[in-house]
Amino acid sequence: MPNIGIVLGSFHKEVGERMLQEAKAAASDHGLTVTDEVLVPGSVEKPLAVKRLLLRSDIDAVVTLGIIERGETKHGFVMGQTLMDKLVELQLEFMKPVGLGVLGPEILPEQVEPRLEKYARAAVEAVHAML
C-alpha cells in the first residue's frame, strides 16, 4: 500500500480541515495510507514541507491542500504561480507525484465552497494515478 504525505496551509484553518478530511477519505478509497500530515502557515512554506516529505523513503507521494484568495494586489497570483512552479520542480527532482489541491490563485470567497472537497479528492486521485 503506497504511503502519502499531506501538506496543508493553516491560514484558512476551518475550510482546510474539511479539505484534509476529504483527502484522507479519498486516500482510503484508493488504497493509499496517509503517513504524515504537515501543517504550514501558508502557501509559501509548502515547497519546503513537501521537499522534506519527498526526501523520506517511506513517502511515495505528497498532496498539497489550501487556498490562495484574490487580494487587493497581485501577491496571491505571484504566490500561486511560484508555488505551482516549485511543486512541479520537486515532483521532477524526486520522481514522486505531488498532487495540487490548492484553490486559486485569486479565487473569490464565493468560489471556495463548491470546490473544497472536489479539489482535495482530485489531488489524491492525481497522485494515485501517477503512482
Image: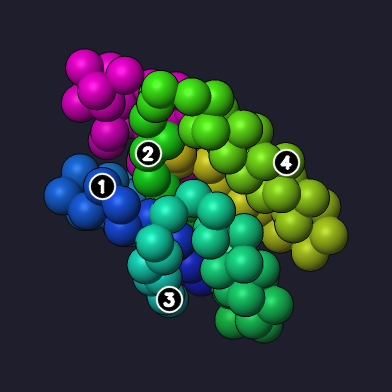
Q: Amino acid at mark 4?
A: Asp
Q: What is the CA distance from the residue labelled 1 to the residue labelled 4?
A: 22 Å
In the rendered structure, the answer to whether residue 31 lies left or right of residue 81 reads left
- Disc 2 is placed on an element classified as strand
In terms of depth relative to the viewer, which is nearer, 28 or 59?
59
Residue identifier under label 1: 12
Does the segment drawn in magenta span residue 110?
yes
Q: Amino acid at mark 1?
A: His
CB contact under 8 Å: marks 2 and 1:
yes
Which residue occupies 48% across, 67% down? 5
Q: Amino acid at mark 3?
A: Thr
In terms of depth relative to the viewer, which is nearer, 38 or 71?
71
- Stretch of the chain drawn in magenta: 104-129
Residue identifier under label 2: 67
Does the segment drawn in magenta span residue 42?
no
Mark closest to the chain's N terminus, 4 or 2: 2
